[in-house]
Amino acid sequence: MNVGIIGAGSWGIALANLLANNGNQVTVWSIIEDEIKMLKDNHEHLDKLPGVKLNDTIEYTTSLEDSIKDKDFLVLAVPSPFTRSTSHSMKDYVAEGQVIVNVAKGVEEKTLMTLSQIIEEELPQANVCVLSGPSHAEEVGRGMPTTVVVASKDTQTAQMLQDAFMNDFFRVYTSSDILGIELGAALKNVVALAAGIADGLGYGDNAKAALITRGISEIGRLGIAMGGKFETFCGLTGIGDLIVTCASMHSRNRRAGILIGQGKTYDEAMAEVKMVVEGVYSAKAAMGLSKKYGIDLPIIEQVNLVLFENKKASEAMKDLMGRDKKDEYTK
């Protein structure tokens, strides 16, 4: 198939290489001319995926039109804060019914919209799908076993994408629960910040397990209230993605949390990670959704207080532990 990758970050490049190695013709777009030159010259993303040699058939361009025109499907792989602006820039080139697979994770703070909802608003002519799951680009780029879910409103499109992406090390399931998958993907980044903060404070495995378990409880309660499926939050894009993001040093959200737990300021942590920490952008949106749907999110609330209200991380953890006594399944 003929595929356009919109965005040349680590995830976009890892998926571009995967698709090319699967026999597809792939074109990668970036707005950054130096980045495109580096990729053309080295067949490697020296900054984002060093050591991963890219398929020689991949083409690279700064022309958005060339990366979109006549493509069987597009992979939108820009960081979540740029999803709306990039989608808006694509509007003159996307054909009626053209499939767009969003692979970023987040919720827009001002509108409380998921990324697929943003894409549909900016590109109403497109057929918008999502691909998500526990899938660090560093591991996918090196061909390490990974399992994800692709979701579409229609089964045929989901199966087409499943066939395009799937190979011996990259297993793809299908789903119709776009909303549930996107909520799990976005909100797990906020919980991963909490897990990182606990690590930075020097807490142990018990605290990590508690944050993962109670974190998926928060995500599930909100997601089901919004119309997501319970099974989705128990699956790869719920508990699966949450585990890997809370446990791995590949996770920029966990790394940022560790730095904050160690006493770094919000700004210092963001500068040291040097990549978009998407959980930061989803944290305020999650609290907006909490108020809108009347769902209590204590972990996510404390993350917001630490990030944006200068609350000490140790005090946030103390307040979580000191909440009123409850039955485990009480909302």
Image (cartoon, rainbow, N blue to C red):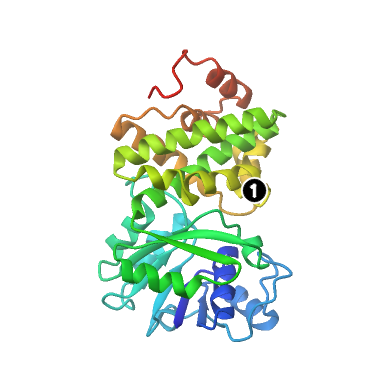
Q: Nearer the viewer, residue 163 or 183?
A: 163
**The N terminus - image quarter:** bottom left
Left-right relation of 42 to 188: right
Q: Residue at x 72, y 67 (%)?
A: 50
Say which quarter of the image contains residue 163: bottom left
**Residue appearing at x 63%, y 62% in the figure:** 145
Residue 217 sits above or below residue 9 on the image: above
According to the picture, the residue beneath numbered tag 1 turns out to be 271
Amino acid type at circle 1 is Ala
Q: Give the image location of residue 231, x and y in percent.
A: 39, 45
Other-residue count near label 1 (Cα within 10 Å), few / some / many at <14 / 14–19 / ≥20: few
Q: Secondary structure at mark 1?
A: helix
From this view, report whether residue 121 is shown above or below residue 107: below
Q: Position of residue 202 (x, y in %)?
A: 72, 29
Instruction: Please indicate whether residue 324 sits to the left or right of residue 223 in the image.
Output: right
Vertically, is 28 above or below 117? below
Percent across and percent down for residue 60 are: 55, 81
Quadrant in which the C terminus appears: top left
Which one is in front, 133 or 276? 133
Q: Nearer the viewer, residue 40 or 27?
A: 27
Indicate left or right for 74 with 322 as reference: left
Q: Residue at x 65, y 49 (%)?
A: 273
Residue 180 image offset from top left, x and y in percent: 37, 48
